[in-house]
Image (cartoon, rainbow, N blue to C red):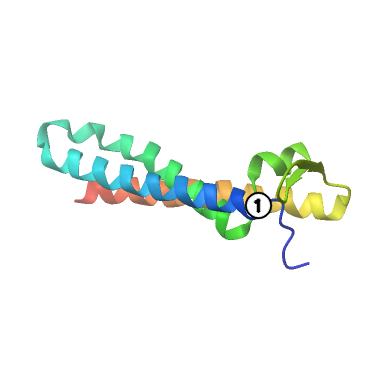
Amino acid sequence: MSSCVNIAGREIKRRQNFGYIGILLTIMTVFYFLSFEHIYYLRSLIFLPSILMTVPLLEARSETCIVNAFLGLKNMGEKYEREKDSESLRHQKKESIMIIIKGILISLLITGLMFMI
């Protein structure tokens, strides 16, 4: 089983747009913190916009919504439906956990790079 998607079309586009807004917020926050040396310890706050950027982009890439996976739902267009295939649902939950872990690791990496600059 290579892929068990639970979102499509408009939902993927919405997550991509939200991820792009997160990229913009992350870049703006980076420049803000780099312009003020006296707030060095607040650079850890870059974690928040970076996680807001990574999770939706990872969801769009894998076509898996983490909330829908844990609620047993899928939104393939117009309305929400119950996921009837238990194997597919298990795969979606596993994919959701991986999205969360990847999002946290990428955000920690971005935060760590902020302290190295």
Q: Is residue 32 above or below residue 56?
A: above
Label count reads: 1
Q: Is residue 28 left or right of residue 49?
A: left
Q: Is residue 53 left or right of residue 46?
A: right
User: Residue 30's x, y, as percent?
Assistant: 24, 44
Residue 82: image quadrant is: top right
Quarter containing the N terminus: bottom right
User: Residue 32's x, y, as percent?
Assistant: 18, 39
- As drawn, which residue projects farthest toward the front? 78
Q: Residue at x 32, y 34 (%)?
A: 45
Q: Is residue 104 left or right of residue 71?
A: left
Amino acid type of the residue that numbered disc 1 sits on in the rendered structure: Thr
Camera-side residue: 113 or 6? 6
Q: Is residue 108 left or right of residue 69?
A: left
Q: Residue at x 80, y 43 (%)?
A: 81
Neighbor class of circle 1 (other Cα within 10 Å; few <14, some 14-19, many 20+) is: many
Q: Residue at x 56, y 59 (%)?
A: 61
Where disc 1 sits, the SS reads loop
Q: Residue at x 31, y 36 (%)?
A: 44
User: Residue 21's x, y, as percent?
Assistant: 38, 45
Residue 115: image quadrant is: top left
Residue that carries the numbered disc 1 in the rendered image: 64
Residue 43: image quadrant is: top left
Camera-side residue: 95 or 8? 8
User: Residue 59's x, y, as percent?
Assistant: 58, 52
